[in-house]
Amino acid sequence: MAKNVSGRAEEPPVLKPWPKRPARLAQAVVENLTDSIVSGAIPPGSTLPVEPELCETFGVSRITIREAVKSLEAKGLVLARQGYGTTVTPPEEWNLLDPVVLSAAVQHDDELVVLDHLVGIRSALEAQMAAQAAEVATDDDMRAVEEILSRLDEETAVPARFIETDVAFHDRIMQASRNRLGRSVIRTVHAQARTAFLYNGTPDTAMCEQANAEHRKVAERLLARDPQGAAQAMAAHIEGAWSRRRPPNPGPPAS
């Protein structure tokens, strides 16, 4: 029986093999193990099963398992040490900007801790980029923002379309800011957040109309070349929209 970092014996984690052998073997193993780690099925401080067991579970070669473990190490999920096996690291060590890790974290975020933090990051970064856009955006940038805003006006009665155009509106302002790093961070975290039902909620026409009224305030401050006003309008919009669709008492799904 394996031992954890404190030397105590531990029960081996139960891993479920997949019903059909995937094409990209190492990546599929990584995604499966990432989900098991982030969900807590393989808790921090425990050790992964040894190579032969992982090979049997997933039906892959040792080379594939070693490649997968190296990828898990790069994501900060495990630490492989000679004589100690491969140990799951504390959540503080996980790279949440890695799409696979973030996706798993969002999917298992029953108490919305990750999503609350993500919205905070969006609010801070997008507010900064709105201020930058108010200063450096070209006339073409401004026209593009206005054009998307007009499309949003037409789509408030069709929430599914509105949501997609909403993303384009925010992204166009980020482009106008010329802050490529900030835009990359937001695009990474927002893409994963949008895969979660708890993040998206069930917007209706009234919610879309309110969101678009807030979009218009952002656009007005951009056109006025008002950095502080644009930042405040963007932060208020992102935080307000989240407060309207955030479940009041989230909890683990029913078994």
Image (cartoon, helix red, strand yellow):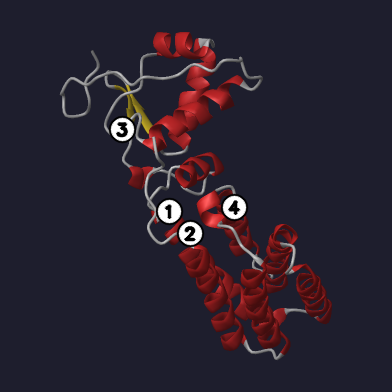
Q: Are marks 1 and 2 in contact (CB under 8 Å)?
A: yes
Q: Does the image show residue 113?
A: yes
The residue identified by callout 2 is 118
The residue identified by callout 4 is 194
119 and 46: which is toward the camera:
119
**Where is residue 195 drawn, in percent x and y?**
59, 47
The residue under the point 71% across, 57% down is 160
Amino acid type indicated by mark 4: Arg
* Mark sitting earlier along the chain (4/3): 3
Horizontal arrangement in the rendering, residue 132 relative to residue 102 (left or right): right
The residue under the point 43% across, 42% down is 108
Horizontal arrangement in the rendering, residue 181 relative to residue 158 (left or right): left
Amino acid type indicated by mark 2: Leu
Amino acid type indicated by mark 3: Pro
Amino acid type indicated by mark 1: Val
Q: Residues within 10 Å of mark 4 (few under 14, many from 20)?
A: some
Q: CA distance from mark 2 to mark 4?
A: 11 Å
Q: CA distance from mark 4 to mark 1?
A: 13 Å
Tag of residue 43? 3
For residue 128, above or below residue 6: below
Closer to viewer: mark 4 or mark 3: 4
Query: Does dot 2 land on a helix, a strand or a loop?
Result: helix
**Which image quadrant: the N terminus?**
top left
* Mark sitting earlier along the chain (3/1): 3
Q: CA distance from mark 2 to mark 3?
A: 23 Å
* Mark sitting earlier along the chain (2/3): 3
Tag of residue 93? none
145 and 246: which is toward the camera:
246
Q: CA distance from mark 4 to mark 3?
A: 26 Å
The residue under the point 41% across, 42% down is 253
The residue identified by callout 1 is 114
**Where is residue 228 drawn, in percent x and y?**
56, 87
